[in-house]
Image (cartoon, rainbow, N blue to C red):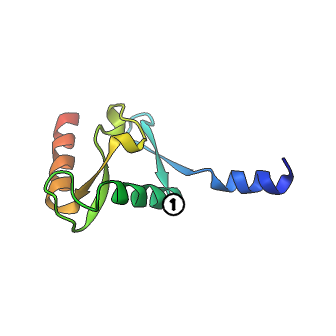
């Protein structure tokens, strides 16, 4: 493999950002950001027919982890779904916050 090929492969590696689920907690998960996140979003939109998994609407959709990453959910398409921002994703997020406490 020549140097040019290695550079191309390295540039395709996803950018990863580390976050904490609670203030002062150890690092819990690594999240995919940037172009890779955009590719994932497009893949899930096509797979799920651009409809919310909970209510079926197609407005303001977000990619959501079915099992949250902080609870051991995988960073994989099998653990992703589309949810509309309001109310479905907001309600799921609020429920998850209550469960953390």
**Residue 42 drawn at (x, y percent):** 41, 61
In this orientation, which residue lies closer to the viewer: 37 or 30? Answer: 37
**Residue 76 drawn at (x, y percent):** 42, 41
**Outermost residue toward the bottom?**
59
The residue pinned by badge 1 equals: 34
Q: Exactly how many numbered labels are in the figure? A: 1
Q: Give the structural element (helix, strand or loop) at label 1.
A: loop
Q: Looking at the image, can residue 88 be seen?
A: yes
In this orientation, which residue lies closer to the viewer: 94 or 44? Answer: 44
Q: Quadrant of residue 40?
A: bottom left
Image quadrant for the C terminus?
A: top left
Horizontally, is 34 left or right of 71 in the view? right
At x 17%, y 63%, the residue is: 57
At x 43%, y 33%, the residue is: 26
Q: Residues within 10 Å of mark 1 (few under 14, many from 20)?
A: few
Q: Is residue 21 above or below residue 53?
A: above
**Residue 64 drawn at (x, y percent):** 30, 50
Q: Quadrant of residue 25?
A: top left
At x 51%, y 60%, the residue is: 34
Q: Looking at the image, can residue 23 be seen?
A: no
At x 84%, y 47%, the residue is: 1
Horizontally, is 62 left or right of 1 in the view? left
Horizontally, is 20 left or right of 57 in the view? right
**Residue 72 drawn at (x, y percent):** 36, 31
């Amino acid at each position: 493999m020549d140097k040019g090929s290695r550079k191309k492969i390295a540039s395709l590696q996803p950018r990863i950002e580390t976050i904490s689920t609670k203030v002062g907690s150890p690092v819990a998960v690594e999240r995919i950001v940037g172009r890779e996140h955009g590719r994932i979003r497009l893949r899930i939109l096509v797979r799920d027919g651009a409809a919310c998994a909970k209510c079926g609407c197609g407005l303001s959709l977000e990619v959501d982890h079915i099992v949250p990453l902080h609870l051991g959910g995988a960073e994989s398409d099998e653990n992703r779904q589309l949810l509309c921002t309001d109310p479905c994703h907001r309600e799921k997020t609020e429920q998850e916050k209550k469960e953390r406490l």
